[in-house]
Each structure stands twice: as C-alpha cells, then as structure tokens.
Image (spheres, rainbow, N blue to C red):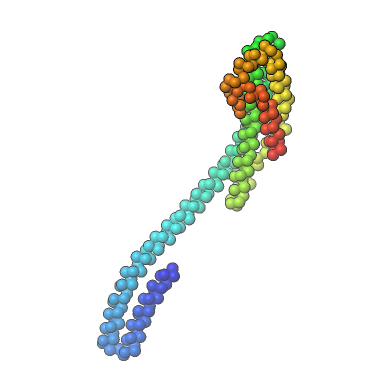
Amino acid sequence: MRFYGFIIGVVIWFLLMGVIYVVGSAPTGSGISAFVVISMIAIPYIGSKVAPTIREARIREQEARQRVEADRQNKLLEIEHDKRFCRDMVASSSLLAQQLPNCLRNANDWLGVAEKEFAEHAYAPYWDAIESAAVNLGDYDAKIKQIRQNQDSYNFRIKALQKSKSSGISKIPPFAINLSRVPSPQKTADHFTKVARRGLTDRDFAVIYESRMTRKVLISGFQTLGEAVKNLSYEVNSAFSNLRNTI
C-alpha cells in the first residue's frame, strides 16, 4: 500500500508542477499548452504503470485471503478429527475392558482341561490345553496394553485441543475405565505358571514340551510356546499394574 501512495504522490506532483508552471508563467497559451501536454503524457504513462500493479496486488490479496481461509478450514477439520478420535479411544477402550473378564475365564477353563489331561497322562492334549490357556492370557495382555496405548493417544489429543481453545471439548467424555470391574490377572497367571510347571518337571511331559517349545504359536506378544511359558505371567501382571497406576 505504501507503494501505491508513492505512485499517487508522483501523479499529484506532476499535476502541481503543471499548475505552478501555468500560474507562475501567466495564463498564456503556451503555458496552458505545456500543462496539457505534461498531463497528457504523465497521467496515461503513470496509469499504465499503476493499474497493472493494483490488479496484481488485488490478486495477491485475494490469494492471501483464500490461503488464510483454507488454513482456517483445515484447522477446523483437524480439530473435529481430534474430537472424534478422542471419543473413539474412550469407546474402544471401554469395549476392550468389557472383554477382559472373558479372557481370564477362558484361560481358567483351559487350565482346568490341562489339569485333567495331566492326571490322565495325556501328553499332547495337556500341552494343547496349556497353549490355549496361554493364547487367552496373551489376549488379555494385548488388550490391557492397547487400553494403555489408547490412554496415551487420548491424552495427547486432548492437550492439543485444550491448547487450541476450541469449543465442544467439555462434551468429550473423560478417559475413565472402571478397573473395579476388570479382574486382576494375578490368580490366573499364577495358576498358569503352576500348571505349566507340572508338565515341565515331569520327564514324560517335558519330552513333549521340548519338541514343541520352539514351535510358532498364535500367542499375542510371543513367538513360541517356550517364551510364553517362561514370561507370560510376568508380562500380564506387569501390564495390569501399569494400567492401574495410570487410570
């Protein structure tokens, strides 16, 4: 805008010089003619320079306004996405928490089967039952860790929304899991360790275990049955303790 002021000032300067010239030299025909000539030359020339510049400036201003509006719309979309994400984290975590008791129930059922197979010296079925119990305990462990991860993601997005001072934050439900309804895995994990230990300390059962311990299994967080038997109880109890300390 300062540039436009400068150009307008030049136009006025030319006109004033013309007036001064005419007035100072008396209103003769030659003075008036000179003024007219100066005006006819200066004004179109300056106009030809100023008009495109003004058009370009208006285009730039319009483009700048469009960029600002686009940024504003993108920010609003991002805020709405974060709000929806936070609500989804709460809903999915609540659903995961509801599934946790069933994981332990299934694990305990399979441990009961393992005890029965051990008593009947059914070597392979015993380790099949141990593996199935481990699958359910592993599922419990994975769900607990997913809830914890959801909480971290929720807290990160909520802080960003609070920083943006956007409206509607109060309508987002808090991340609150009722842990009183989530059974501790400790008894089941201890039971798993105890029952698996029976097989490990029995020579005949141990022979079958040695042949299966490195076999790939579908136990969340573990690649082999051997890893699960050795570390699963600790992992499950640790995951539950971490979640309890943060919610």
Is 23 rendered above or below residue 114? below
- Is 79 above or below relative to 185? below
Coordinates of residue 217 in the picture (x, y in percent) = 58, 22
The residue under the point 69% across, 9% down is 120
Q: Is residue 98 visible?
A: no
User: In this image, 29 relative to 172: left or right?
Assistant: left
Residue 247 in the figure: left or right of residue 42: right
Rendering quarter of residue 135: top right
Q: Reply above or below: 200 against 175.
A: above
- Seen in the picture, residue 13 relative to 185 is either above or below; the reply is below
How far across and down, in percent of the image, does residue 222 sit?
Answer: 61, 26
Q: Quadrant of residue 173?
A: top right
Q: Looking at the image, which is closer to me, 94 or 139?
A: 139
Using the rendered image of the protein, determine whether residue 213 is visible from the camera's viewpoint: yes
Asked if residue 217 lies left or right of residue 205, the reply is left
Looking at the rendering, in which quadrant would you find the N terminus? bottom left
Q: Position of residue 199 (x, y in %)?
A: 69, 16
Residue pictured at 69% horizontal, 28% vertical? 234
Q: Nearer the viewer, residue 110 or 51?
A: 110
Q: Nearer the viewer, residue 17 or 226?
A: 226
